[in-house]
Image (spheres, coloured by chain):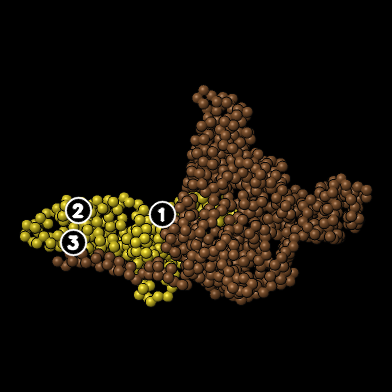
Amino acid sequence: MLSFIGRSIVQKTVTLFFVSVVSFLIIHLAPGEPSQVDPLNPKFTPEMVERFQKAFHLDKPLYVQYVYFYRDLFAGRSVSWRDNQSVLAKIWERFLNSLPLFIVGTLITWTLSFPIGIRAAIFRGGLYDRSTTFVAYLLISIPGFFFAYLLIIVVVNSFHVPVIGMETFGLGEAPWPSLFMDRIWHLLLPSVLGATGGIAVLSRYVRAQMLEVEGQDYIRTARAKGLPPEQVHYKHALRNALLPFVTMFGLILPGLIGGSVIIESIFSWPGMGRMAYEAILARDYPVILTVNFVSAVLVLAGTFISDLLYLVVDPRIRL
Amino acid sequence: MTVRRVLIFAPTAVILFLLQSYFWVPTYEEGTRANPARLHEYITASIGDATVLNPVLSADSASSDIESMVFEGLIDRDEALRFRGRLATSWQIYEEAFFYVNEHVSIPGVGRAGGPAVADLLQRARGRDFPANPKVKASLENIEQIVVIPAREFLVTRRGKEVKGQEKTEVKIRVQAPARIKLVLSQVDQDLFKNLSAILGKAYFASFSGQDDLTIDGEAWQREKPEYAQEILPATEHNPIVVFHLRPGVRFHDGHLFGANDVKFTYEAIMDPKNLSPRIADYEPVKHVEVVDPLTVRIVYNRLYSPALGTWGMGILPEHLLNDEAMQAEALRLGKDPATFSMRESSFNRHPTGCGPFVFQEWKSDQYIVLKRFQDYWEGPPNYERYTYRIVPDLLTQEMEFYAGTIDSYSVRPHQVKRLEDDPKYQSFSGLSFGYTYIGYNMRREPFKDPRVRRALGMAIDVEKIIDFVLYGQGERITGPFVKQTDYYNAGLQPLPYDPQGALTLLEEAGWSRDRDGWLEKDGKKFQFTLITNNGNDLRKAVLAIAQDAWRKIGIDVRTDLLEWSVFIQERVDKGDFDALVLGWRMGIEPDLYQIWHSSQTHPHQLNFVGFQDQEADDLIMKIRQEYDHDRQVAYCHRLHEIIARAQPYTFLYVSKWTAVLDKRIVIRDRDSEGRPVYKQITPTQTGNFTFYFNKWIKLAEVPYLTAEG
């Protein structure tokens, strides 16, 4: 067990190093310059561009820039080129904004997918099963932004309440329960939209997994024993079908920092996705690379956690 | 069974909890329309967030929107685009001109002369008539004072040019400067020295060389001697001077009195290399800024550069909050190294203090920026109590918020103009933007070297149709490189007619004829080229397709290509590697065309990438940027416009029109002589700027019935 953890940490550190090198290279090989050294701004003289390049160390060889960047990052000193704000502080602020969206979205996805998928599996081939299949594929194929616009227009026009942003604009001084509930309301639409794709996919998985388990010999045995169908489905089948999902739980961790550019832009949500997107447009390397690095760390941590979880829930696996 | 119950109960609970929050949220009706405070607040929206709220450091439009409310410049432009005083009450422009006495040439009728003799000669020449050239008399009359600066000796050190493998060395130069004459002129006169040579002889200025007056130690630098001589001892020098008289009693938002030291400080902050200001190029011609007294600043320029006056519209920073002492204190407070700490890192950039009409209050990144009115604003406080700048990155969302009343203005997209223009709930404004779209031809390459070919290509395209169908009618034709609303634009010129037959005739004159398949051909070679533009701009993409189709119709084989922006710029435009391209320029009001049209700017990475070269145009471009008299500048611009329109290095296509809608309840509230409020409708200025009187705007509870005047 300990040796597994040790080995896995070493492996992941090596992977992380390669990720850092590759992402650094890709960003610097991509065409385009940081907007501060934009050569097409007619007001910029070559001397100014040179001075900016010096200030950002862009005149140094790539490996030196690499060392500088990660030194600053680990010392917590790296600043965004666009506004000179500390990158870590910026990411933390955005992370806190994206977090509620992520939590509510995940909550909706995971609580809804299971009942939908299980019922579809139990009544396989029935009307309910076929209609959920249809709706699931519909949700997967409709582009998120289109769905978002439809929802906004319907809600705004028929309920006359604001849905944009993190809170009702200009609410001012109100008692804290209404401020809290106002925030919940503003979470509703974007997180439902963020969850639709997840629900569609996850409920399909649940259904497939249930079907597979229901076909097993021990389920037939359980039925043959004369157990009530409910006990067969929810105790014998469901528990075994759950195994793969436990591991998936670790993998949703990277979603914490990803955020959704489209949903956040449409709902004016000041989240991670929008910040990363704008950083890419402005070629704000410190922000892009830090977000990239943090998400790489989360991906690796996520796989590590799911390995551990598997170990805990599946008694057949021993290391 | 519990599992089943949990499975059903959990999602139901989550969803019910989320849905019940609806009952806690105020509707738009309660939140905006029924809220009396809403009438005293103006809310506008922007796609992007500001980056740095410091006019010296920022370069994006969202930041400058806020800065224009929080900060104030010395001058700005009035309704007719003339300069008017803001923090400055008035200003004077005059000139000090210098030339070295050239004792190596003889002056006609006098012979070789020293400083006092030359001064005396000029003194005597004043009042004389020059029938051959009346301009000489005018130039002489313009001279107010003649001073002789005696010869002197001094030492200068210059950084030597970098030689590979060697350290940078300092070059010590001993200079024995000859006597110099200083002329104080009441007005800037760019032709002064040309006119003075009528008295002093044609070669007097041209033949002066300071080389013999320099002594440089070290063999290695002798070769650079002419360069150093040119720099240290220029034969002639124009020093235009602007004196600003500042408004007394103006205060910053923190109560500190504004004064000349703030102006000087703002200039120095821009020039400080530590600050990496993107505006440094604008102020490079400034020699120095002097504080004459607390309410007078004197700005001396090292050469003639008329666009320089406009740069003083720049917001003035408060010195007492940003000077070295304040920076050191802030660095210590934040635990940073005071030696490297610069204005770029200061928290001022997120909490600015200026002397504009609105005081900064709060900034939530990517959400909103809130300003409140400044009670002590020198022109009287604005009518609105609050100004809110919301960041709404999605246009459709902006539109929905506008209809709901949580945003007061909305920039209409071209296809919506017809629908919203006549809506009784809104008032709409429209105007031309400061920029144009064009097709540029690489004039270094065949067949574009021939002006007839370029003209023919322009005539083959139906620009009216582009405006009608691509821009939904929201555009106007343009014939040249100046802003169409200004008087620099030569309105007498007609755009190229749409005439494919005429185009074919012109091409025939140029030697192109149609072959059996209908393609144009010259000396056995087909007329074939590639038209490119950048990816991601739908309008340019449409123009690309329309031009290709129009040219195919007259027998030209055009290929098209769309490239990613940075590849497009770096690989094709910067390197001059293209046949023809669709692109647009955004312009300022100043008519300085040096970077885009001067023949010296045709090298790689420069902006005259089409390779336009014309001697007369070059002269005019130089004259325009050195001329301080508006009328003469206008005359030069009209001529330059004509030359460029005749040469057709670009096919000038269109300027697009913008339209903005506002709630109809927003009006102008002024006070009459007895202090009673007078309500007026908002009217745009000549250039279409409807926010010009923003400080007088207010929102009423009901749609008012107003007559057009009063």
Q: Seen in the image, is B60 located left or right of residue B108?
A: left
> Which subunit holds the residue at mark 2?
A
Rounded to the nearest whole Å, what is the CA distance between mark 3 and mark 2? 21 Å
Numbered label attached to residue A129:
2
Between discs 1 and 2, the one toward the N terminus: 1
Residue at mark 1: A18
Is label 1 in contact with label 2 (beta carbons under 8 Å)? no
For the point 46% across and 60% down, the residue is: B425
Asked whether residue A29 appears in the rendered view, the answer is no
Q: The disc labelled 1 sits on which kind of residue?
A: Phe
| Label 1 SS | helix
Rounded to the nearest whole Å, what is the CA distance between mark 1 and mark 2? 45 Å
Numbered label attached to residue A310:
none
Between discs 3 and 1, the one toward the N terminus: 1
| Label 2 SS | helix
- Among the chains, which one is yellow? A
Asked whether residue B675 appears in the rendered view, the answer is yes
Numbered label attached to residue A239:
3
Q: Seen in the image, is B192 located left or right of residue B451?
A: right
Q: The disc labelled 2 sits on which kind of residue?
A: Asp
